[in-house]
Amino acid sequence: MKLILSDRDERIIVHSPAPVEQVLLEAGINPLEVVVSRNGNLISEDTIVESEDVIRVIRIAHGG
Amino acid sequence: MCSRCTEPAVVYQRNVDRHLCGVHFTADIERRVADRVKTRRMIVPGDRVAVALSGGKDSTALLLLLSQLFPVGQDVQLVAITIDEGIAGYREATVHAAEHHASRLGIEHHCISFPDLFGNSLDVFLEGRETQACSICGILRRKALAVAARGTGATKLATGHNLDDEAQSVLMNVFRGDLPRLIRNSGVDSSGKFIPRIKPLSLISEKEIATYLILKNAWNILPECPYTRFALRREVRSMLSGFEYKHPGTMLHLMESKEKIEHSCACSEVSAPLRTCRTCGDPSSGDLCQVCLLLQSLGR
């Protein structure tokens, strides 16, 4: 699947179907610090993502 | 799948074990904020509420939610106030976003800058003192908000502090051993010297606010304040967020602990009695208020 981080960093990762929460944790991201969309739609942390999915990770912490 | 309909879920609320779709999630946020405002009597008929609008996500969500709760023409008036501290490469974009949101919602908007109030921008004040950025900015911004709110004739000052911010503050005050600040309730003013500050989003998590804004098409990607890398809050945020993930409810429990301590200390003298600053005349715990002390140390 393609994992797009909000700093324009894109990673292609090979993964069997798994909850998005697990994908985030394996990428070193706390699921509480991001919002995730799949193919343009927001998804919950326990949604199962597939190898052909495009996952966008939006970081939410913002000082100010 | 949403726990209330057959639409796909956009969030999973871990502490109540519930999935919600976009429609039911936005309704849930709007109901919780309305309940908080009502049960705490944060806003009452006749109030003129100054909404501190930085242009960032929390204050944008606050303005959006309050403008739905109190539409233009009703017996509560909203006015947005923005503080431009003078942080190059950061604040310009958020001030622009603030102007955009206020204008889109048809809400009166005022902007006040540190140079107007204190004679210099934050960037200038911080030369050689970058590691103290958040405490210096916090003291000056608090004063700037009070001045701006007074200038608009506001009876309440609403800020966008969310659950994460509030829980972080509890922990930071405990780390510092600062009991007076831990139990300070700025939502009530028995002295008549302050505009009461209200925090309608204080039980809504940062993630819920971001999700709400995305669903409302009001999410902007903005630069991050360049001084946050010096902040203790950044470390506390990361630690607390890790705890919340492993132990859902941690942040709410911290808030409950704070309220219990506040209640236990209600009749105790933990803060010095209020005096008047001999330089500016504002309420103060000492001979000089924090702002005048700070400006003196900054050479103003």
Image: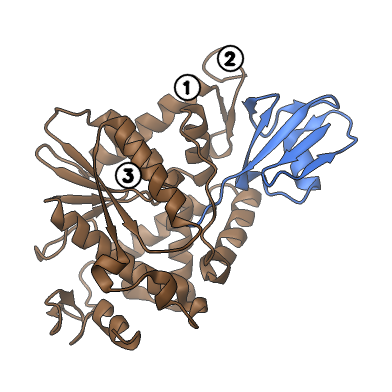
Chain colours: A blue, B brown
Residue where numbered disc 3 is placed: B200
Front-lying residue, B119 or B151: B119
Q: Is residue B71 left or right of residue B26?
A: left
**In the displayed structure image, the side of residue B64 where residue B225 appears, left or right:** right
Residues marked 1 and 3, same chain: yes
Q: Is residue B270 visible?
A: no
Number of the label disc, if any, that sits on residue A9: none
Q: Is residue A33 above or below residue B274?
A: above
Mark 2 surroundings within 10 Å by alpha-carbon count, few (fewer than 14), some (14 through 19), many (20 or more): some
The chain to which mark 1 is attached is B
Q: At which x and y percent is residue A40?
A: 65, 25
Residue ID for mark 2: B7
Residue identifier under label 1: B24
Label 1 sits on a secondary structure element that is helix
Quadrant of residue B179 in the image? bottom left
Three-letter amino acid code at the position of disc 2: Glu
- The quadrant of the rendering that contains the N terminus of chain A is top right
Q: Chain of mark 3?
A: B
Residue type at numbered disc 3? Pro
**Which circle's residue, 1 or 2, is located before the other in the chain?**
2
Say which element carries label 2. Answer: loop
Question: Marks 1 and 2: CB-CB under 8 Å?
Answer: yes
Distance between the alpha carbons at the discs numbered 2 and 3: 29 Å
